[in-house]
Image (cartoon, coloured by chain):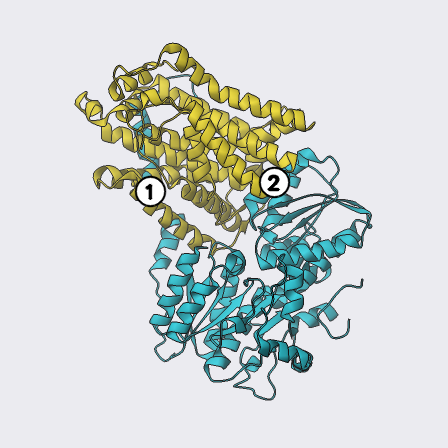
Chain colours: A yellow, B cyan
Amino acid sequence: MSDRSLPQRRAAAVVAPGSAAPRWQARLRTAFPFATLLLLVIFFSLLSPVFLTLDNFNNILRQMSILLIVALAGTFVILMGSIDLSVGGTVGLAGVVCAWLIANWGWGLNVLPAVAAMGMAIGLINALIYVYGKIPSFLTTLGTLSILQGIILVISNGAAVPFSNRAFTSLATANLFGFPVIALWALAAYGLSVLLAFRTRFGRYVYAIGGGEQVAWLSGVPVNAVKIGAFMLAGLFSAVAGALLTARLQAGAPELGQSMLLDSIAAVVMGGTALTGGVGGPHRTILGVLVIAVLSNGLVILGVHPFHQIIIKGIVVIVAVGLTLDRSKVGVMK
Amino acid sequence: MAAPSLRPAPPSGRSLTRREFLKLATAAGATALGAPLLAPAASLLQAPAARAQESITVVELVDTLQDEYFVTSTAIAKQAGEALGIKVEVVSFELSLEKQVAETENAFTRGAKAIRTNAPGGGASLNGVMEKAREKGGLVLVQWDLLPWTTPLTWGDEFAMFSIAADDIGGYNTAKALFEALGGKGNVLHITGFPGGTNDAQRTYGFDQALKEYPGITLLDRQPGKWAREPANALMRDWLIKYPQIDGVFAQADASAMGALAAIEEAGRTGITVVSLNGVKEAVEAVRDGRLLCTSSILPHWNAGWNMVRLFDQIKGWKPTIPERFMVWEPVLVTRDIAQAYLDTIIDAPTPPYDWLKMSRVLHPDDWEVQELLIPENPRTFWQKFSGKPEPADWLHPDFQRAIDSGELERIAQLYAEHEGNNPVKALKKG
C-alpha cells in the first residue's frame, strides 16, 4: 500500500502545508518498520533454531491475531485524533458475556453476533457522550472503561467463567489447511479496515477529520456521523476480539483484555499512525503488531530474564516509533 | 526428604457507503445492551440491608476484585463477620499502593476498628498503612506479603498479626506430586507468579527443594505468568514451540495453570502433566475431571473467616502472645481422589463448614477451636528462606528474640495443635 494515498496527501496538506518530506525520505520511513521487523527476525533466527520454523510462524500468527483486531479497533479513532481507552474493557466484557451465555444459557455460536452488537452499542454510547455531550474522548472512554470493568465483575463475580463448547472454541483454536483460523479472523478484520480506510467515503472522512476537523466540517464532512461510525467500529472489533480470546482460553475472566490497551496503542503508533490524527492508517498497524508479537515471542524463546524483557520492549517501542512516524506530517508534537 | 508437614508428627470486495454502514451499525446498536448488561446493572442498585445494630466495623481491603481468590475470601470474611455480629466492608485498592494507604486512612476515619489487607510488592506499602493505623489507633492484620526482615513487632501494637500459608510446603508437595507422576524423570517448566513477593518466593523455594531431590527432572525454563491466565497462555504457546519434549508444568497459580492448559490443549500436545497452587473452584473441578493433576489449596474458605475472628477477639480486648502474631497454616493438596469431596464439603457446601464462633478466644476462652493446623513461625528461619536478601544486624525485636529463646513458639504450637478441633479438611484427607 503506497504511503502517498489521497487521504494522507490531503491530511498532510491540512496539517503542515508545504512541509512534506521529500519522496525518498517518505519511502525510507515506510521501509523502517519492515526493516525493524526484518532485523528482529534475523536476530532471533540466528540465536534460536526454533524461531524461524513453520510452527513458530503459526504461533506468532495466533499470538498477534487478537492484538491486531484490537489495534485496528483503535486505529480509526486515533486517525481522527481521538482515543478509545475502553477497548480493553469491551474485550473483557465481550469475553465474560460469551462465557456466561454459553455456560449458563447453553448458547453456542450465536453469542458472536450478540456480543458484536453489544460492542457496537458500547461504541455508540461512547460516541454519543463524546460527540453530543462534548466530553473529550479520553475522559469519556476512561469512564466507560471503569463502567465496563464494573459490569464484568458483576457478571463474573470476580471469578473465571469456564465453559465447554467445542464449536465456539474452534473459532479460535482450529486450523484450516494448517493455517490458524484465528489468523483468518484477524486478516478479515485487516482487509475490512483497509477497505474502509481507502475505498469508502467513511475512510476518507476519517482522514479529513484527523487532518483538521474544522476544515473537514467546513468542507461538508458529516463529522459527528463519522465519529459515531469510528467508535462503533472500535466497539465491534473489540467485542469480536474478546469473543475470540475467550474461545482460545476456554473461559471468560475479569482480567482479560486489560493488557490490550497499551499494547494496541503502541502497535498503532509503531505502525506510523500519529496520536494527533490524520497520518498513518490501518494498513500499517499490522507492522506495529508484528513487531510486538515477534519481540515477545523471540524474547521468551531466547529465555531472556523477564525483567530484561520489559526493558527491551520499552526501548524497541521508542526506537520503532522514532523511525516510523513521519514527523514532517505532524504539525505539533504533544 | 519426606513430604513436609506442619504437623508435629510428620471482507467483502464491494465498497461500503457511509449510509449503508451507518444503517447496519445503528440497527445492531439498537438491539444491544440487552439482558447481559441490564440485569447485572440492576443488581448494582440493590443495596445491602442496613445493619444498624452492628457497632464494630472491619474493612476488608483487598488487592483487587478481579481475582477469584479475593472474591472468595471477601465473601467468607463477610460470612464470618455476620456470625460474629460485626460489619465487614469490602474495599479494593486495585493494586495501587498509594490508594491502599489512602483507603486505610479512610477506613479508620469513618470509624473502622480494624482492616485486613495484603501488602503486595513485598510489603512496600506497610510503612504508609501502619502510619495511618497508628494515627487513628486501629488494628491491621496482614496476609501474604511482608517487608523482608520485619515482624509485626517492627510496627508496634497496631499490627495485629501477619499470617500466610506455608506455601513452601505447598510448593514442595505440589512439585513432588508432579515429579512422582512423571516417574522421577522428565522435562518440566515452571510458571512463577511475579518476582518480588513473599508468597511467590515461598512457592519457588518449595519447588526448588523438591527439584533437588529428583535428579532425573530437568527444569527447562522458568518465567512469570503474573498470577493470571492470559500471560501464562501466551508464555506456554512460546514454550510449546521452543521445547519439543515437555512432560510437566508447575504453575504457581491456578489461573496460570488454566491458561497453560488451554494452550496445551489447543496445540494438541498430550502427555503434559500440569499442577498448580491456590485451590480455587475452577482448578479443583479441573483436578476432579483429570485435566490438572493437583492443586495446593491455600484454604480461602477458612483463612479469611479465621482472620475476622482474630480481629474480633483483639477488638474485644483479647491480647495475643508474640508468637501468635506471626503464624502460618498448612495448605492442603487437592488430588483427584478428594476433589469432589473438597467441592462438596468446603467450596459448594450448603452450610459453612467452619464454626466461626467456636474459633473465638473471647466467646470460647477454654474450648476454642481453630479448625485448621496453625503454627507460629520463627521469623528468622522464615526470612532466611524467602527474603532473598542478607540478614541485617539487630533486625529482630528483642521481645521476639526472647520469645524464641524461651521456647514460647513451641508452647504456642502445642496449644494450637491441642485446639485444632474439628478440621473439615483433615477429615477429607483421612476419609
Mark 2 residue element: helix
- Residue B5 x/y as whole percent: 73, 68
Three-letter code for the amino acid on which mark 1 is drawn: Thr
Residue B11: image quadrant is top left
Q: Residue at the front extreme?
A: B393
Q: Amino acid at mark 2?
A: Leu
**The N terminus of chain A is located in which quarter?**
top left
Residue lying at 61% horizontally and 53% vertically, measured from the top left: B254
Which x, y percent locates residue B159? 49, 73
Q: Nearer the viewer, residue A289 or B296?
A: A289
Compared across the picture, whether B53 is left or right of A44 comes to left
What is the chain letter for disc 2?
A: B
- Total count of labels: 2
Dot 1 crowding, Cα within 10 Å, few <14, some 14–19, many 20+: many
Residue A3 visible to the viewer: yes
Q: Is residue B285 above or below residue A87?
A: below
Image height check: is B52 above or below A1? below
| Camera-side residue of A165 and A293 | A293
Q: Residue at x 48, y 50 (%)?
A: A254
Q: Which residue is mark 1?
A: A141
* Outermost top residue: A23
Residue B156 coordinates in the image, percent (x, y): 49, 75
